[in-house]
Amino acid sequence: MSATQSLPIDISNLCKSYGSVKALDDVSLNIPAGEFLTLLGPSGSGKTTLLMALAGFVRPDCGSIRFGGQEMIATPPHQRGLGMVFQSYALFPFMTVAENVAYPLKIRGVSKSDQSTQAERALDTVQLGGFGDRRITQLSGGQRQRVALARAMVFEPQIILMDEPLSALDKKLREHMQIELKALHHKLDATVVYVTHDQREALTMSDRIAVVNHGRIEQVETPERLYRQPSSFFVADFVGESVSLPVDVAGNTAQLAGRVLKSDLPIAPGGGHRLVIRPELLEVTPGAVPEAANDLSGEVHEIIYQGDSVLVIVNHDSAGEINVRVPANRAGQMGLPSKCERIGLSLHPQDTIIVPDHAS
């Protein structure tokens, strides 16, 4: 099953205010046809308002939204041809699974025989073949989520919008459905815009991620580049686990506690800067730190076992606490330091992230 043809989405200078609150503050974003783009941000950042503006449920104060070059600002929601998956799934409990899935076809005047055929095909796509006669109340949370997906895609939309559809699922099922959704997107020729506040979910599923904060887009990048090269302290702090330390920057040179930091990444201009340390990128060295790396050595303050890894908290000589994440496998356990032991910590220049401190 695939859509007829995906459409690009072009958003230009979009604004929406509620009183003195700017929910969308001059947002511009281009989404290529067929891309899986995630809007990621904390509660109240504006990501859902942006999705609802795309859906037509929120009317922007200014700006433009174009699907495939066609202006959509004045087009009502039911005429935008969108597939939509809501956080609550919004399924009809008085209908069977098949009737729920076929509903978008029914309101479009599709014949009953074609409704049945297309609904069955959509259910097969989400691995719910044979569930058509069941009631919604007989399904698990994961199965209901799949029904909502099948209903969103049954009429082969060119654009599908998803508003935190996995948030009601338990952790194990949510992670399983992330992989399934990613695989399903590869089967469909549709542009997907997905909203979540879960950064791991965004990293797992997306072609690109747009980080939203206070109604503005902070950065749009692929998951790997967003994680490894954040453009601001907010992005670095929000996406992934990190520890940050204030640094002094002059031109392209940064210093931590008076020692020059080696970094292969560009340093953006700004008032203040911070060194962002990803705990899993630090290396514990048995002897002296290699000359080519940054030396963050210190004394072990605490060791915390967390199942898949061990968190080692180190007191740097002058910069403060630094977190190191060590794998909990046999090799990692054998090299685990002791509390109060002094250890060498090295940070490779390719992993040395220095960003403007927008929070300062």
Image (cartoon, helix red, strand yellow):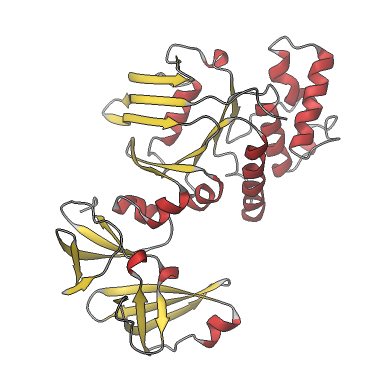
Q: Residue at x 30, y 63 (%)?
A: 264
Q: Residue at x 68, y 36 (%)?
A: 187
Question: Looking at the picture, does residue 191 appear above or below residue 155?
Answer: below
Q: Residue at x 50, y 23 (%)?
A: 55
Q: Is residue 257 visible?
A: no
Q: Residue at x 78, y 25 (%)?
A: 119
Quadrant for residue 228, please give it. bottom left
Q: Position of residue 154 (x, y in %)?
A: 70, 25
Spot the residue most to the top. 109
Q: Is residue 287 visible?
A: yes
Q: Is residue 281 left or right of residue 205?
A: left
Question: Looking at the picture, does residue 155 appear above or below residue 277?
Answer: above
User: Which of the image's four quarters has the C terminus?
Assistant: bottom left
User: Which of the image's four quarters has the N terminus?
Assistant: top right
Is 129 in front, or is 264? Answer: 264
Q: Position of residue 69 (x, y in %)?
A: 45, 17
Question: Looking at the picture, does residue 346 appear above or below residue 33?
Answer: below
Q: Is residue 280 left or right of residue 342?
A: right
Spot the residue most to the left. 250
Is 142 in front, or is 308? Answer: 308
Quadrant for residue 19, please give it. top left
Q: Position of residue 39 (x, y in %)?
A: 45, 39
